[in-house]
Amino acid sequence: MDLASSRLTWNLLACLCLSVAPLTAQPTTVDNVVLITLDGARTQEIFGGLDIGVLRSTIDDVAVETTEVYQRYWASTPEARRKRLMPFFWGTLMADHGSIAGNRTHGSIVAITNTQRFSYPGYAEILTGKAHDDIITSNDNRRYPFPTVLDFLKNELGLDRNQVAAFAAWETFRWIVSNEAGGFTVNAGYQAATDPDPVIRALADQQFETLTPWDNVRHDFYTFRMAMAHLAAHKPRVLYLALGETDDWAHDERYDRSLQALAHSDDYLRELWEWLRAHEQYRDRTALIITVDHGRGNTVADWTDHGSETEGAQYIWMAFVSPTVSLRGEWRDHDPIQQDQVAATLARFLGLDFRSLTPTAGLPIKALFAPAR
């Protein structure tokens, strides 16, 4: 073979190798995790958008078609309605980057294991990896002795108090997120800020000038803005963002405001995602879990309610975004997922075993860590 032929052969082989080699290897773990909860956000709105029956039940002597809510969010199919309500979540996040379970019409079941079906037991199940029905029976501002996945990650990764942070609309999160006070950054409800960052301090001051109708829950706006300011100032590896207005407006029978809270949450998700993508520490190195503490009733008579006697409140949804997971869109016909699996799943994204701390905790969600095919 002459020199020219030899060069041609090697060039062809090189091109062939490049054409079959993957451009980037899919990582097996991430460096950062973000947990987001939308309190009491029903599966009906997440998967189907505006519920016309519920809307009709909340208006008096007005044609539903003339209402601003109908004109803003109504469409002829569930898929179109949910995309009008949460365009970023459905049009970008779930379509291109993540997946979501909990649409029971597709054989996708996600349920809580606690029997209480209200907030504190639900958040405790999420964070501790198991239900504590015999002990956690109220929403009282009380700290329980169970270590949470946030405590676990801080200790296992050797993080300082700013590297793990929880920002929440509801004040009771000051007691929920850890079995010990002061271990990491927590700001929840109407709480002053101790952070020296001027943006965080200004937001904390402003929340007291724009009160909600509820004494122990602030506007989601402040919770989100303080979390974003903390991201910019401290670059945490573990962040928990707990929004609450989806639940509080529903309890007040303000379906319009509850839908608006979901729409605002969609805006927050978009801004958070774009921020993460813009920073090297987080881009393609961060996993997100988005879920809820409990569901709500199925009908126009009980959509505002939840609790042990409310049918439907046991069903929730979970969404997952991670560079380690190739699943996209809606899950279908799979083994049921339980709320007590969130803690171990968060830890597993970081390559850690939460069950080394709590052996009886729920297992990591298997499908998220199955080998790519």
Image: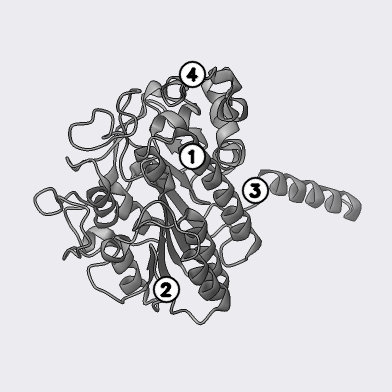
| Comparing labels 4 and 1, the label whose residue is closer to the camera | 4
Residue that mark 2 sits on: 192
**Dot 3 or dot 2, earlier in sequence:** 3
The answer to whether residue 73 of the structure is visible from this angle is yes
Q: Nearer the viewer, residue 305 or 99?
A: 305
Disc 3 residue crowd, few under 14, some 14–19, many 20+, Cα 10 Å: few
- Which amino acid, mark 1? Arg
Going 53% across and 30% down the picture, which residue do you hit? Answer: 82
Q: How far apart are marks 3 and 2 (CA)?
A: 53 Å
Question: Tag 3, which secondary structure?
Answer: loop
Quarter of the view holding residue 306? top left
Tag of residue 39 = none
Tag 4–tag 1 contact (CB < 8 Å): no
Comparing labels 1 and 3, the label whose residue is closer to the camera = 1
Q: Name the residue under label 1.
A: 257
> Quick one: label 1, few (<14), some, or many (20+) residues within 10 Å?
some
Quick one: SS at disc 2? loop
Q: Which residue is drawn at 29% across and 56% down?
A: 127
Return the residue nearer the eye: 237 or 117. Answer: 117
Gap in Å between the C-alphas at discs 1 and 3?
A: 51 Å
- The mark nearer the N terminus, 1 or 2, is 2
In the rendered structure, find residue 21 and report the number of the disc placed on it.
Answer: 3
Residues marked 1 and 2 touching at CB (< 8 Å): no
Q: Which of marks 4 and 1 is nearer the N terminus?
A: 4
Q: Which residue appears at 40% of the width and 32% of the height?
A: 43
Give the amino acid at mark 4. Answer: Asp
Q: Which amino acid, mark 2?
A: Ala
| Residue 61, disc | 4
Q: What amino acid is labelled 3 in the image?
A: Ala
Frontmost of labels 3 and 2 is: 2
Nearer the N terminus, badge 1 or badge 3?
3
Which label sits in the foreground, 4 or 2? 4
